[in-house]
Amino acid sequence: MNASKSRSSAAVDLVEREAGLSTSAEAGPAMTEDDTVCVLAVLAEMQRIIDRHLEKTGQTQPKS
């Protein structure tokens, strides 16, 4: 599995744990600092993908 898929999978696992959806016995009650860093890296990559797509399509991302 490549690093990007691994980070994405880890992010999904973390979201499931935080939402109480995980059935894993090792699921902890809170995210560690490493978990947080991993999730932020995934979110940053997702934002880069969105930005590239918007550049290619000539659109701009709406401001929140």
Image (tube, rainbow, N blue to C red):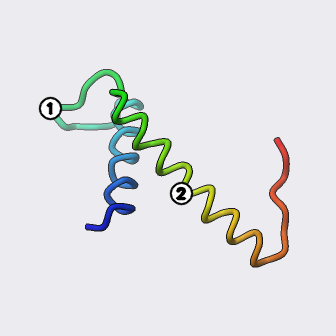
The answer to which of 34 and 61 lies nearer the viewer is 34
Q: Position of residue 14 (x, y in %)?
A: 36, 38
Q: Report helix, strand or loop for mark 2.
A: helix
Q: Position of residue 60 (x, y in %)?
A: 84, 62
Query: Nearer the observer, disc 1 or disc 2?
Result: 2
- Farthest residue toward the top? 29
The answer to which of 13 and 3 lies nearer the viewer is 3
- Quarter of the image containing the N terminus? bottom left
Residue type beneath disc 1: Ala
Residue beneath the point at 40% across and 46% down: 11
> Is 3 drawn above or below residue 24 in the view shown?
below
- Farthest residue toward the left? 25
Say which residue label 1 marks. Answer: 25
**Number of marks drawn:** 2
Residue beneath the point at 84% across and 52% down: 62
Residue type beneath disc 2: Glu
Q: Report helix, strand or loop for mark 1.
A: loop
Q: Position of residue 9 (x, y in %)?
A: 34, 54
Badge 2 density bin: few <14, some 14–19, many ≥20, Cα 10 Å: some
The reply, left or right, for residue 38 in relation to residue 45 is: left
Residue beneath the point at 79% across and 77% down: 57
| Quadrant hosting residue 53 | bottom right
User: What number is the disc on residue 45?
Assistant: 2
- Quarter of the image containing the C terminus? top right
> Is 37 drawn above or below residue 63 in the view shown?
above
Q: Position of residue 48 (x, y in %)?
A: 62, 61
Q: Earlier in the sequence, mark 1 or mark 2?
A: 1
